[in-house]
Image (cartoon, rainbow, N blue to C red):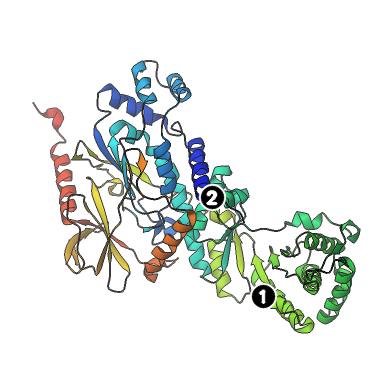
Amino acid sequence: MAAPSGNTCSRVMERSIRDRVPPLLTDLYQFTMAYAYWRTGRHQEPAVFELFFRDNPFGGGFSLFAGLHDCLLLLRSFRFTDEDVEFLRSVLPPATDPAFFTFLRGLDCSGVTLRSVPEGTVVFARVPLIEVAGPLAVVQLLETSLLCLVNYASLVCSNAARFRLAAGPGRKLLEMGLRRAQGPDGGLTASRYTHIGGFDLTSNVQAGFLFGIPVAGTMAHSYVTSFASLDEVSPKTLVPVNGDPDPVDFISLTKGLLSRVCEILGAESGKIREGELAAFLSYAIAYPQNFLPVIDSYSVGCSGLLNFCAVALALCELGYRPVGVRLDSGDLCRQSVDVRRVFRLCSEHFSISAFDSLIIVGTNNISEESMVELNKKENEINVVGVGTHLVTCTKQPSLGCVYKLVEVRGQPRMKISEDPEKSTVPGRKSVYRLVDSEGHPFLDLVSLAVEPPPEAGVPLSCFPLGCKASSVSVTPAQVTCLRLDVFSKGQVTHPLCSAAESRAKVQGSLQTLHPRHKRLQEPDCYTVALSEKLHSLVTEIRKGSSNNSNFLLAN
């Protein structure tokens, strides 16, 4: 498969981001707040926001962070056009000062810095994924766009990782959800991030072009049912691989082999569908090295499998190698076992070793649960194609990322909610992953940015989130900083990763995670904790908020 060069791909993707996520792709209240900041002279105040999610998705023990690549391209290209500004004039209240629109026309992200967890990293609830710092008005305007780019990408990437865990390492996974996705952009995003999350192949040709993902696919049932007779096969001959210039009557060769297959298997030739055989013949003549038909358009055992074997044997006789079959209905496990048994019989009877390596693809509304069940049963499926339940994330439609203010003018800010789950953690922070002596992460420590980093082999006290208990003492064998400086002064400061590089990051990150945190059902909860100083800051701000509640009564 030919993919665009790295530079070409980067240019195409940046142009795509400008088209898909222009500055107007945001909520109106971002502009009304920006105007209010500007009107009071606060728009240039230094501010810091954090992006995080509150609960691990799908009832699981982890998530994967994805979407950073697109966020960086957004920041690099962020600026308003004259047309953008004129539209804003028409939708903002008439009392809006015209000078505000001049301000918007000159706005960009040259004053914005972004620190982030590396894309493809295993992450957990409440850990800050992205820190966005810069002038208050512009970092406010970025909120909705950044959330849009991270929420779905991280969710579908995590969903793909769960499918990969359910399938096991030995089975190939094909993403085929474009037709079920929430629009073209949803489909393209799904193809990219499901590949990063662990899928091997995609049916999405544009995703293959843009991201270098291997593409796969052969035929649908409509192709098979469009044929009714062998008279429709054209051309009817195929040239052997060995260079013999004389074409072989492929139909006659296949019909002779079909009679022998029926005899070996004790099958009734009267139940074989001629149109199906015609479809297989026509496709095999067109793509003799890529023959992988769907065999359940009528009956797998009475027609589809017999027709496939005959055409595949004919291809082998002419020196070609058929690829395999696809099953798309019924009991996939039982059928795959039956199909494999017939392949072995043909291999033995006709002395065709190629039949030992034929693959079986299973596709039939596969969900995470059905993938788990598939692994519990005897089956011979080599590749599983997943669509709807993968790209639409039917078990959980949104990751629920939020973007919260944590600092203004160097002073910490905290949202104190009646719902404790919605309270935020104030201040600019660092994030460290603590690793045990076996190489497994066991705790993510969130500390103030001014604090020294934890050290390997040195005990530390911290306060686990979600626990009312007192502090705990831990001693890490290794410490990893989870924050990278990725954007500054209008430029991306860390190399952008390709889909393949992010995919490798995911696999490496998941491998280090302890199996108890990767269980699909009832995983152990991973610990995220605050440093002592950060915990003290939270406590002080809560107390201060309570003490200042009667400011209206003050003199």
Q: Residue at x 64, y 61 (%)?
A: 364
Quadrant into which the C terminus falls: top left
Position of 552 compared to 232: left or right? left
Q: Is residue 97 visible?
A: no
Of residue 60 and residue 339, the one placed in the foreground of this image is: 339
**Residue 373, how many percent across, how many down?**
56, 70
Please tell me how crowded label 2 is: few (under 14), some (14-19), or many (20+) other residues with Cα within 10 Å. Answer: few
Residue 208, compared with residue 509, is above or below; it is above
Of residue 472 and residue 291, the one placed in the foreground of this image is: 291
Residue 435, compared with residue 353, is above or below; it is above
**SS under mark 2:** loop
**Residue 12, how many percent across, how many down?**
52, 42
Residue 11, compared with residue 468, is above or below; it is above
Q: Which residue is mark 1?
A: 357
**SS under mark 1:** helix
Q: Which residue is mark 2?
A: 5
- Disc 2 residue type (three-letter): Ser
Q: Residue at x 84, y 77 (%)?
A: 262
Cα distance in 3D space between marks 2 and 1: 33 Å
Give the label, 2 or 1, closer to the camera.
Answer: 2
